[in-house]
Every structure is written in C-alpha cells, then in structure tokens.
Image: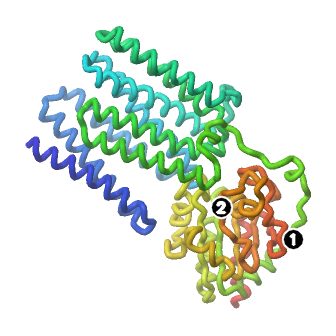
Amino acid sequence: MENLIELGYLISIISFLAGLKFMSSPKRAKLGNIIAAAGMVLAVCLTIGISISANIPRTNLLVLSVAIFFGGVAGKRIEGKVEMTKMPQLVSLFNATGGACALLIGIIEASQNPQSLFLQFCLFVGVITSGVAVTGSLMAYSKLSGKKLRIENKNTSIFTRTILLTLLFIPALILTNIYAGALGPIVYVVAILSLVYGILFVAPIGGADMPVIISFLNSITGIATAFAGLVYGSYVMIVGGIIVGSAGILLTALMCKAMNRSFLTVLSGKIKKGSKKASEKEQIIQEISLSEVALELSYSSKIAIVPGYGLAVAQAQHICSHLQKLLEGRDTEVHFIVHPVAGRMPGHMNVLLAEASVDYSYLKEMEEVNEEMDSYDLSLIIGANDVVNPAAENDEESPVYGMPIIRTHHSRKVVVMKRGMSTGYAGVQNDLFEMDNCFLLFGDAKDSLTQLVDQLKLISN
C-alpha cells in the first residue's frame, strides 16, 4: 500500500513538471493547466487516504473535507466573477492564502517543540518567508486596486529593509538555540515580526511595480512551501515549492528585463524620470479621424495590432477580435504583436485575447516581427505607450533607453488610439507621436473600435 501511495505522489510530481512544460506554449497552456490540476487533485486524495489509514480523528478529517469543499466553491465563484483587468489582484490574493497556509503549518509544527536543529531551521525560515508573503501580497493587492494606505513610506530604503530582515532572522536562530525546549512562544514572535516586515517590504514600492513584486512574493511562497515539505518529508510539497519558487524568480527577472529596470531599482520604489524640460516640451502631433482610419484599414493588406493595458481597461478585446475577423474577411493579413509586459503581467494580454476568441496563430512575439516591421502597411496601437517608444533605442538619456520595444515606427503608417496625451508607466513622452508616419486617434478604445467596425462594414457594402 505504501508503495502505491509513493507511486501516486511520483505521478503527481511528473504531472506538475509536464503541466509546466505544456504551459510554455500558448496553444497547449490550457492542457498544461488541466494536467497540473489533475496532479494536485491526486496528491490531495492520496493525503486524505493516508490520513484515514493512519486513524486520524474523524473531527480532523471532517474539518479538512469542509475546508476543501468551501475553498473549492469560493475559488470557483471568484474565478467566474473577476474581470480580466483584475487578474493580477486575484493572483496576489491567492498567493496571500498560500502564504497563510505555509505560515500556519510552521506555527503548528514549531509548537510541537522539535529537537532537531534542521527541523527548527526549516520551520523558522518557513515562518519568516510565508509571513512576508502574506502581508506583502495583501499590500500588493491593495496597491493594484488603487487603495492608498497611510502606512506607506517612500523613505524606507533597501538598506533599511535589509537591516530589519537581519534583525528578524538572526535573533530568531539565537533564541531557538537558547530555548530549544520551548519553541512555541518564540515562533509566534517570529511570525508577528515577519508579518510586519512584509508590510515594510512592499510599502515603499509603487503600484506600477506591483506585478513584479507579486511574482517575487509568489516565489517566496514557493520557498516556504518547500521548507514545509522538508519538515513533513513530503516530496510533493518540496518539488511543488521548488517549481513555484524558481518559476517566480525567472518571471521576476523576465519582467525586469522587459521594463529595462533592475530588481534593486524596483525594490527601492524609485523610477528614473526624464528631464523636466523634456517632459514639459509640447509635442507636435497629427490627429486622424475615424473615417480616415477606416479607409486606411480597408486599403491595407498587412496590419499589425499592438494591444496594451488601455485595451484591457476599456474592455475592448471582444470588439478588437471582431475587427480582426472583419479584416480577415477582406483578405487582409492581421497579426497581434504582444510585448512581454503588455497588460499588467506576462501572459496577461495573451489570456485577454484568448478570452475574446483570438486564435493563437494570429499572435506574434516581439522578436518574431521586429526585423520585418517595414512590411506592415499599418500598425494599430491600442492603449500601449512605453513599449513602442523609439526613445528606447535612440535616446541614451531616456529612462526607457535599452528597453526592448516593438518597432512599430518602421511600418508605413502608425495609428495610436489613446484617451489623451498622458505619459505611460515611465513618465516620459513618446517620441513616436511626433514622427511623420504617426497619427493619433483620441477617444475610448471600445467606442472607437466599435465605430471603426461599423464604418468598415459600410465600406464593404
């Protein structure tokens, strides 16, 4: 029986790895999710089976079953109601619950006063990391939701926060060795301090950087889970924690690279701004009307659509999909070019377009098309800003210099759909707007796209 259970856990681990591999491809991402979820269900069922065979009190099993049931129902209801623009907030909230679970495990197990120094180390590291993940994720959730908190302090430097973490961690190890027979009270103190540190860790960081921090906190939760797995001797928890931890770190590095910012700069809460003179310079732009854009679309044989967060805010993905299908019906070649950090997190825009039934064959990565952007008759930019700013390649003084961009300015004509002339995340003006081949169409993205679809239909008739 024990061998069968171990085999089942091995299958769960393999399913996690296979699911992660499948999720690296947009076409197979859904199947990857299903495989990984099936592995998790198997692991939970095996754990319940072990609990029953080990004569665990029925009350404990009842509590476990009720928790799983209500947790599943709550998760399903939340998943069905959340808007795509709020997906990063949901990820942050779920990460807080995962951290809370690891924190409770650490507290409960430490209360049993284990004598092994290795177990003590694992428990305290798990408590510290999970505590930071809980309050840090809740802070990130609040910032992404646009809530300003009084506890925010922009003057809390990286150095100060590092000192605070050191003051938390070292005394915890010292107290563990001194009071090895009474770990319970100590672990509560460490848990409280780690929760406080989680707030101090995230408080100075701006809301625009929260997706990066969420990814990092997700990796911290994975580390906490791996340490909990070491305590229980659970290979599933160890492997699952390592996968989450490493994936979170890699995603954090990817996002920082795509925004041309170091992780330390993100942690400092500071954003390099362009010169005041440059930011206040009045740009000379060319406006374009809806009817003119409709004509340009109708006469173009190859079109690039570059979606940004503005598309998500306007909830315009469905009408954008309708536009793409209408253009395809006119024998126009249409591609969606997605920047790695389009939206609020990597993959956010891909999911948004998938929700609107845009086939993945129409999606192109930035690296695939940048060298051939001059072959596009028209680039239609919807709600994107910094990711198409030529200053990233041409202006060494610009805060975005060095950031990978989509070279839409190389296409024959560029139409940018914007609400107004506000700057993007980096807080600098977009040099693209002043180029001879660039035209701006002002208005709500959803309304503008709806009218474009209507006018294209009239042109077709």
Could you tell me how many numbered marks the image carries?
Answer: 2
Tell me which amino acid carries mark 2: Gly
Q: Is residue 254 above or below residue 331?
A: above
Residue 64 screen position, x and y as percent: 28, 34
Q: In this view, does 449 lie above or below 93?
A: below
- Residue shown at 45% from the left, 15% from the top: 171
Query: Is the residue marked by circle 2 packed among few (<14), some (14-19), or many (20+) residues within 10 Å?
Result: many
Tell which of 399 and 55 is nearer to you: 399
Tell me which amino acid carries mark 1: Gln
Image position of 372 (left or right of 56):
right
Residue 393 screen position, x and y as percent: 72, 63
Residue 421 screen position, x and y as percent: 82, 58
Residue 14 screen position, x and y as percent: 26, 54
Image position of 49 (left or right of 270):
left
User: According to the image, label 2 marks what residue?
Assistant: 308
User: According to the image, label 1 marks what residue?
Assistant: 286
State the mark number for residue 135.
none
Q: Is residue 95 above or below residue 374?
A: above
- CB atoms at circles 2 and 1 under 8 Å apart? no
Query: Is the residue marked by circle 1 packed among few (<14), some (14-19), or many (20+) residues within 10 Å?
Result: some
Tell which of 457 and 271 is nearer to you: 271
- Residue shown at 24% from the left, 49% from the top: 42
